[in-house]
Image (spheres, rainbow, N blue to C red):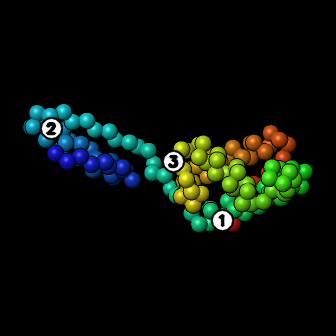
Amino acid sequence: MKFKTVKPGNYDDYWVCIGWVDKCLEVAKEKGIECYVTISADKPERKITEPQFNAMHVWLRMVAKALNEAGFSRHLDVIGANVDFDEEHLKEDYWKPLMGALKEDAKSTKEQSTDLAQRVYMELTRFWGEKGVEVPEWPSNR
């Protein structure tokens, strides 16, 4: 007997799953074997879109500007100097590590889910807010 994973995408798919489960149980009973079935109602993760990815970079630039204006800087141990924040270092030093901490298998900002991007944004907003920096809202084209 072959097993397959079914992830329902809409309400009608649940009825297909129920029909498949009934068939699985019927075949298992005929063959005298046990059948275990798990049905998940979890929504599939939506990958971040190109406009959302671009908005993330716009937001990181705006945050870098806000941090620099608030008097924050990054320390470079190699040369012992403080330098301004910028988009790429915020992404590499803050966004990606937090993204990985929130979801272990998250590797790429382009491949992150929309839910994960929202969580990272909220956590970084809270983090910088606790340091007294009011970071800008997420940019929108609306």
Reading the chain from its start, which is encountered first: label 1 or label 2?
2
In the rendered structure, the answer to whether residue 118 lies left or right of residue 87 reads: left
Q: What residue is drawn where x is 73% and y is 54%?
A: 90
Task: For mark 1, give the secondary structure.
Answer: helix
* Disc marking residue 54: 1
For the question of whether residue 142 can be seen, the reply is no
User: Which x, y percent locates residue 29?
Assistant: 12, 35
Would you name the residue on which mark 3 appears? 105
Would you name the residue on which mark 2 appears? 28
Mark 2, residues whose alpha carbon is within 10 Å: few (<14), some, or many (≥20)? Answer: some
Q: What residue is drawn where x is 65% and y is 65%?
A: 54
Which residue in the rendered view is the most extreme toward the left?
30
Q: Answer above or below: position of 129 versus 87.
A: above
Q: What residue is drawn where x is 34% and y is 41%?
A: 39
CB under 8 Å between discs 1 and 2: no
Q: Answer above or below: position of 62 versus 104.
A: below
Q: Looking at the image, which is closer to me, 2 or 73?
A: 73
Q: CA distance from mark 3 to mark 1?
A: 22 Å
CB under 8 Å between discs 2 and 3: no
Tell us which disc is closer to us: 3 or 1: 3
Q: Amino acid at mark 2?
A: Ala
Reading the chain from its start, which is encountered first: label 2 or label 3?
2
Q: Looking at the image, which is closer to me, 82 or 69?
A: 82
Q: CA distance from mark 2 to mark 3?
A: 35 Å
In the rendered structure, the answer to whether residue 7 lies left or right of residue 100 reads: left
Image quarter of the C terminus: bottom right
Image quarter of the N terminus: top left
* Disc marking residue 101: none
Tell us which disc is closer to us: 2 or 3: 3
